[in-house]
Amino acid sequence: MHSKFFSYIITFPFEQLGWGLRKLSLSGSAGNVFAVTVYILICLAPCLLCWRLKTSGKLLKTDFFLPALSILLFAVIYYMINPGLLNSSVSGTGKILLGSTFYSVFFGYIILRILEKCSQADKKQLNSWLKALFGIIIFLFFCVILSECFENLSASFQSLKAANTLENAALITTYTFLVLQCITNIIPYALAIFILFIAIRALSALLTDHYSAAAVAAMEKLAVWCSRSLIITVLSSMVFNILQLLFHQSLHQINMVVSIPVFSIAFVLAVLLTTKYIRENQRLKQDNDLFI
């Protein structure tokens, strides 16, 4: 089920577009001319966008990826129209390979353009974009939590039931630990969502006046909760593993969690360091104001 969903997402809308253009092309000479016209216009869309950006004076260095995207579109859609020409040694992966290649180049271009745009942006624009990015991350983490609670936990229950012929009463301890594992898995994401909301408020305070007491307080609150979240995440994994060790004789499925949150530690240290810099800058400004 996961592979079918991934295949649909990674080949959309190219597979559907190829199927439609193929049907249109086979409908007659007029349909063939129309299909070829649509095919060319779609493939030239990135080049037209590049020309539009150039004429409006908004062309960036990374926009020279757009002609490459047009060339790639010609190949991807052509093979989607003629799937029989795909000679992949691994059956069923041809269309997925086409879609993956296009999206890797497309999203790579988007990321590089955002980075170039950010290097030219002022403080207010960067603040707004960072808030928008945090909002996207919050949404993605929320989706991960929902998937963990409803999809992965349900799949774990079904897998446990299928692998054992015991009654549910005999598996109650294992079911309980599967729920505990689910909670352990979602704790980092739930805490991350909470921290991101604090970070958004801190960004607003810093934009208003990064020397103000409100900005310093917001950053200190962010630093405190970053540290607390890291502690909670590490302790939750430790407690879960210890409980599994204590009840291992009653469990019919064991999932050990060994977590080394290197990036989380680096992030916490970066926030703590930034908070100290902001606090010191505020004190220096206050001293200068008193001196003047």
Image: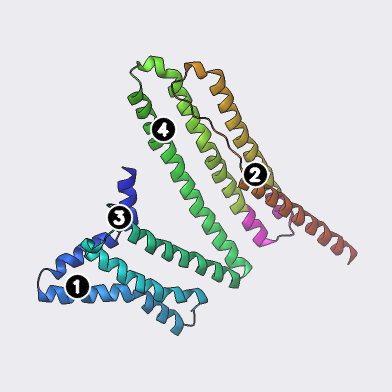
* Highlighted magenta segment, given as a residue range: 202-219
Question: Is disc 2 placed on a helix, strand or loop?
Answer: helix
Left or right? Give the position of 144 relative to 273: left
Q: How crowded is mark 1: few (under 14 residues within 10 Å), some or many (20 or more)?
A: many
On residue 89, the disc is 3
Q: Is residue 230 left or right of residue 14?
A: right
Callout 3: helix, strand or loop? Answer: loop
Q: Name the residue under label 4.
A: 153
Query: Do the residues bearing badges 3 and 2 touch, measured as CB atoms within 8 Å?
Result: no
Amino acid found under the numbered disc labelled 3: Ser
Nearer mark to the viewer, of 1 and 3: 3
Residue 35 — which label?
1
Mark 4 crowdedness (10 Å alpha carbons): few <14, some 14-19, many ≥20: some
How far apart in space, not on screen, are marks 3 and 2 (Cα)? 48 Å
CA separation, marks 3 and 4?
A: 35 Å
Q: x, y percentage for residue 254? A: 48, 26
Residue 175, quarter of the rendered image: top left
Q: Residue 226 carries which label?
A: 2
Given the current orientation, which residue lies at the most extreme bottom position? 55
> Which residue type does callout 2 highlight?
Cys
